[in-house]
Image (cartoon, rainbow, N blue to C red):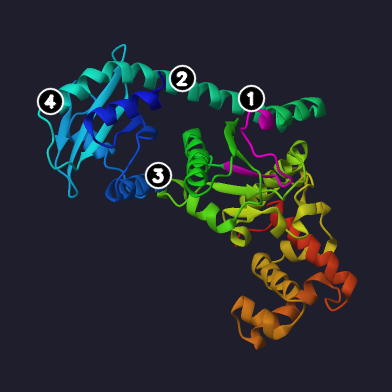
Amino acid sequence: MSLDDAVQDLADRLGVALVVLDHDLKIAAFSVHDTDARLARLARLLAGSTAPVTNSLVEGHRLRYVKHGVRVPQADGELVVLPLRHEQQLLGYVYYVEDREAPRVDDLEVLESAAPEMGALLSLRISERRHDKENSKNLLAALLGESPEARSAAAETLVRENLIDDVENYSVLVLQAPESSSRSVTRLAVEATLEFTMRSTTVKIVGAVLGAEGIVLFPRPVNHDRLERALADHDLEEVVAGVGSVKPSLPEAVDSYHEARLALRASRLDRRRYGRRVFWEDLGIDRLFLQLPLDRLTASQLPAGVRRLLGAPQGAELATILEGYLDSGGEIQGTARRLRIHRSTLYYRLDRIREIIDCDITDGATRLELHAGLRIARLAGLWPHR
């Protein structure tokens, strides 16, 4: 008998709607919810907006240690919770909300008598999940690896085992926690993305933590707003996300992965411009610059005008003025608005910049050289401190 069958049989015996949670309070199984009130509770639970069994409830009622059912008064009916164990190990909980007009006196006894079998079945379900996770992780690593043959084989297996949809649109999301955080934060970000997607759509996606990176493979373009909502948890606000473009076949998803890593790098190097959620499509000319050996560049390799400007007194401020001027296409009013300075101040500082770099900033070729040089200097960390 499967866990689902055991839960449904017990629910039918008791006349209640049962839910089984694993040790992390994530849904492992649930019975049929056959009334409007029960369906509404289930919908809220699946949407992640409410969960009757919380960590505070577990701690407050010592549910990790009790061996019998616990009744907890709730606003919409009494909550009945029972820990599930297998071989003395706590694996999760089964619960229901008491909404019957005439409960039987032996309900807890029936529930507790079924607990050993449900604990064993929950243990099997958890083992299967671990195997599926490890399998998905290995296939994802092969899909994004160096060997074309391994990528093709992994793509075939992912589709055959129904782990990802067989479509013509694949994109990769790369997640990474700050260096000061533990790797578990990256894992939480992957799990949050997977859970949000499973709650909000029937699309099949695959995710895993590979090294220091969290990777999620989508059979569709990644939606910016939904990505923000998936990572909306306070603990994940510092997580950086890079998103690659859509590719037409699963073996080509490796190209989306490399793009996503470059997008993530853009956030690391220029948080001011890109923030923490960066899409390859938004990088513009930085797509090229980010593929340079930026960590090996020195100031001596920059164009002469850029080098002189960055090395001058107030170099950081003047370089920012010139960058804003070039970003605005040399338009004075737009530059002043962008930099939030008066036009007379802008004119004065542009004159100062001309003196330092000793070249005509209205010349197209000169502008290109200066603009590219300034951008590379910022990405390479060669911008002087104020």
Q: Residue at x 66, y 65 (%)?
A: 316
Helix, strand or loop at mark 1: helix
Percent coordinates x, y for residue 269 in the rendering: 65, 52
First-in-chain label (4 vs 2): 4
Q: Are marks 1 and 3 in contact (CB under 8 Å)?
A: no
Q: Secondary structure at mark 4?
A: loop
Cα separation between marks 3 and 4: 30 Å
- Residue located at (26% from left, 20% from top): 115
Q: Quadrant of the N terminus?
A: top left
Q: Residue 158: percent from the left, percent from the top? A: 67, 30
Q: Was residue 165 drawn as part of the magenta stretch in this picture?
A: yes
* Horizontal arrangement in the rendering, residue 67 relative to residue 216 (left or right): left
SS at badge 3? helix
Give the quadrant of residue 338: bottom right
Classify mark 2: residues with Cα within 10 Å, few (<14), some (14-19) or many (20+).
Answer: few
Query: What amino acid is at disc 2?
Result: Ser
Residue at the spot of label 4:
106
The residue wearing badge 2 is 127
Question: Does 155 appear above or below 291?
Answer: above
Q: Earlier in the sequence, mark 1 or mark 3?
A: 3
Residue indicated by mark 1:
138
Picture quadrant where residue 385 is located: bottom right
Instruction: Please state, as top left, top right, bottom left or bottom right, where the C terminus lies in the image.
Output: bottom right
Please state if 162 lies on the left or on the right of 100 as rendered. right
Sequence-wise first label, 3 or 4? 3
Mark in front: 3 vs 2: 3
